[in-house]
Image: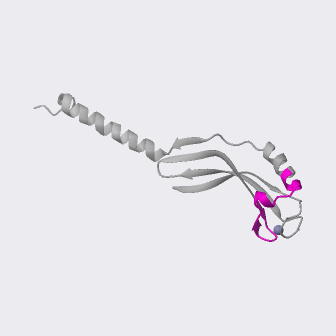
Amino acid sequence: MKTEHIILKRANLTNNCPECYATDGMVLSFMQEKKTSSFIIKTNKKVLDNIHCSKCGTQIFPGRWTPDIERVYDYHRKTITAKPGSTKFTGLSYAIVFILITILSLGYIYFSHPELLGLTS
Ligand SMILES: [Zn+2]
């Protein structure tokens, strides 16, 4: 399974970084996780967030947030719309189901009504 992140929103924060005190380095991201395999695509409805400072290259964990960062975070959190969680089948899944149905139908006809296949002699 391949995991990707769907970016819902990315915002540049002007708050002071708690690590390096730069005011133009922090980026707040909201994202959702999407897992893809050959058969299904699954979107997790849980919204993940992350604040990263590009000046000092540090991820700012919630324990390090200042009240100002929390306020800005809450503001942005309200503006995003999360995608509903979903599980979708890929084209390959449908193709396999279609092939199976075809094989089963042919098998059924072969055993029950061989005359339909022109097999009676
Ligand atoms: Zn920093």
Q: Which residues are magenta?
A: 51-70
Residue 109 colored in magenta in the image: no
- Front position in the image: 101 or 64: 64
75 on left or right of 116: right
Q: Residue at x 39, y 44 (%)?
A: 96
The quadrant holding residue 102 is: top left
Residue 57 colored in magenta in the image: yes
Q: Residue at x 48, y 45 (%)?
A: 91
Q: Is residue 25 above or below residue 75?
A: below
Coordinates of residue 67 in the picture (x, y in percent): 87, 54
Q: Residue at x 76, y 70 (%)?
A: 57
Q: Is residue 31 above or below residue 110?
A: below
Coordinates of residue 34 in the picture (x, y in percent): 60, 50
- Front position in the image: 89 or 23: 23
Coordinates of residue 88 in the picture (x, y in percent): 53, 42
Q: How many marks?
A: 0
3 on left or right of 107: right
The quadrant holding residue 103 is: top left
- Front position in the image: 19 or 28: 19
Coordinates of residue 29 in the picture (x, y in percent): 75, 55
Farthest front residue in view: 63
